[in-house]
Image (cartoon, rainbow, N blue to C red):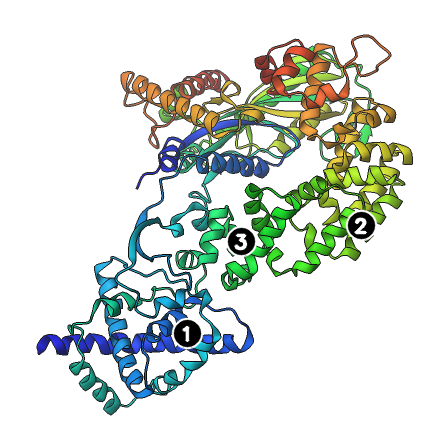
Amino acid sequence: MTMASSCTKLCLQCKGLLRSKTVASTWQYSTQVRHCNTVTRLPTKFLNGSSVIGGNLTAAHARQRWKQQVFCYSGLTTRHLGNEAKEDNDLEQSSGAHVVAYKSPLLPIRDAVPATESQISLDLDAAAELSALEEINDEEAVSISVPAAIPPASTSLRDYVDQSETLSKLVQLGVNLWKLEQRPNVGSMLLKLNFNTDVAPRLLFLKEIGVEDSRFGYIITHNPFIFSENLENLRARVNYLKSKKFSSETVASMVSRAPYLLNFSVKRLDNRLGFYQQQLNLSASNTRSIVARLPRLLCGSLEPVKENLKVCEIELGFKANEIQQIVTAVPKVLTVNKRKLTQVFDFLHNTMKVPHHLITKFPQVLNTKYLRVKERHLFLEYLGKAQYDPTLPNYISLNRLVSLPDETFCTEVASATLDDFNLFQKTL
Amino acid sequence: MSTPAVRMFRKLEGLFCVYKPSGVHWKLVRDSIETNLLKGLNSSPSLPLPQEVRFLAHPSDTHPDSEAEAPKGLTLSAASVPVLSKHHLVTGPEFQHIRVGVGHRLDAFSSGVLVLAVGNGNKILNNLYRTRVTRDYTLEGEFGTATDDFSHTGRVVERSTYGHITQDKLDRVLAMLQGANQKALLLYSNVDMRSQEAYEMAAQGLLGPEGKSEPILTGLRCVNFQPPNFTLEVQCLNETQKYLCKVVHEIGLELRSTAVCKGVRRTRDGPFTLQDALTRNHWTASDIMHAIRQFHSLKRKKKHFHTQTKDPVLQPPEENVTTASEQTETSDEAATAVGRVK
């Protein structure tokens, strides 16, 4: 009897704990049922365990209390022994009907939380009758569902990943959950997603338009809000892009490289395309090629682009047709940092004495790092080979100056070794 | 538990030096080195995921609610599944921050040797800071202009002729400056110049300021003179790069002309020379590991040499990291100091 009393004492303690936990989760659950159809794991597990009981309500009530006790005791043992023999129930399918039917048996339990001593003693008697050492048949043993010890609220998704089907499948796809949980509210949004109704249709849609499976992780990590977009809207946007004569492979590559693209409305995409076409006075096919190569242009705001264009025109002194040529060849110039652009241009034009038309011919120099251009130019100057005028002999073209990797640059352009270049860098 | 990343990090703890290019803030250098080290550490292979045993329902009945009704016989199967909560995409990278410390700082205008320390090397860095370690600079100057911040990028304040300046006059001015600095050195030594103690300290090269003091140039000479450009080589203590630009400006004034500083380049910081400095394309984890290994072997060699030539008087009281080269150098200066004192 002493063992039973100690058992019941333990049961009482964890019952108190568990009751508050399950009550909290059932409250949570009931409010959720009212607002939306998604279902979280813990409360339904609890309900499913009790759904084993059939028949009349009173028997169910008593058995349920017993079940609850077994529930918490087994929970204790598993915690102590450490081996988690959990059943991985797929509970996202449990229908609303079950929910409604079993809310009523829960009500008396909820009210029992501010229980009096007499009530607890009553339960003790009940516990003494139905002890945990009672023999149950195999079917009931199999159907005991042990709830996972997951906290009702947590700052990290790693507490929920093993129990949530959505999260496990996202990790298997390659989504960086750690990065996503740093963003506010994204973690809770992902947890509430239902894999089969929310995630899978959109991934299938992406596959339909031609995005490769290996890119899903990248896309979701950068844009988790693709799951809150209406499928109809997504289809409409893809159709709009196709109507603007983007081929399907181009659309697929644009979506893979700019994950936020399909979150923007058709009107906004239209606005952007129109802006680029008008501002730069480009033909439709040129606009298409720029946007296809740098799909980020359609996603970001237009203010920095306008500023960059003004800088090119006024500060750097390029003519309109030169700007057109530069942007068609290297669209990144539209989004590069203004200060870096002016720094590189200043060095190119005033120190290296390269005229505007040559820079227009080799626009990738505007995209390089300032230090790279400076070191290489000074090295060539030290060797006496800094000659960028195509009309004179020993001409070195600007694209060979900046685009070649260090070793090739040293051997071919400067006719020196890499060590010499390193030693020279240390004299600057 | 020692993962390959942790083992790699142990090898990365120590001191090394990089060549900081001019026009870049030292903090950017430190940040990019930290980013590169993190990249290198987190790319090392991680341990395999731990597995756990779970009892999964037999997938014959597709409707999971049917599980609620007693299934015919036990249809649970044990499966060993990986614990996804330990996956690196869920827990984040193994290393999220590394302590990278900077030795004597260099301002954005100057370039040169910048000493950095990783992890436990920061303690040795503190010692380096506290010992009296000199630094070598190369100053490029140009006669004819004076600016408000003493460098060639400042606003021009004055222009003057420099035709009258010869190498001889320059050398005389430099000698005068050096003398003044030697006097300052003796003054800050906190020792009565007429005592035996002062003589012994001077003989071993231990004269000098303890801790913070005015910047003192322990050596100064002109290596290149082609008017209007000239190059100076300086050894100094407790200096800032702005002070060195000011020195160039003052030299111009002493020569009845004006001068401006075009470049400040640190060629040596204590035992770290230009030879060991890593250039920008070598700021990767593997190159840094190599440089740190070199530093450790050098330290071991010098400790060995130190214990071999052990002399109780020679042993400085504070630390055991002073290298033999620095000792010989300070004794050279002591010799000249003794000469001047006379």
Which quadrant would residue B14 be assigned to in this image? top left
Task: Indicate the position of residue A238 as horizontal and vertical percent values.
Answer: 72, 51
- Residue A272 circle label: 2
Q: Amino acid at mark 1?
A: Ser
Q: Chain of mark 3?
A: A
In the foreground, B325 or A393 = A393
Q: Position of residue B115 (x, y in %)?
A: 49, 30
Q: In the depicted view, which residue is nearer to us: B222 or A180?
A: A180
Q: Quadrant of the N terminus of chain A?
A: bottom left
- Identify which amino acid the numbered label 3 is placed on: Leu
Q: For the view shown, which residue lies furthest in the left direction?
A: A1
Seen at 85% across and 35% down, the residue is: A316
Task: Tell me: residue A120, above or below residue B144.
Answer: below
Q: Amino acid at mark 2?
A: Arg
Q: Nearer the viewer, mark 1 or mark 3?
A: 1
Q: Are marks 2 and 3 in contact (CB under 8 Å)?
A: no
Relative side of A395 to B325, left or right: right
Horizontal side, residue A167 vs residue A383: left or right: left
Q: Which of the numbered marks, if any, corresponds to residue A180?
A: 3
Residue A25 numbered mark, or none = 1
Within 10 Å of disc 2 (Cα), the crowding (few <14, some 14-19, many 20+) is some
- CA gap, disc 1 to disc 3? 25 Å
- Residue drawn at (53%, 24%) of the image: B278
Name the spot of residue A23 as percent of width and height, x first. Answer: 38, 78
Picture residue at 17% right of the left edge, 77% below the top: A131
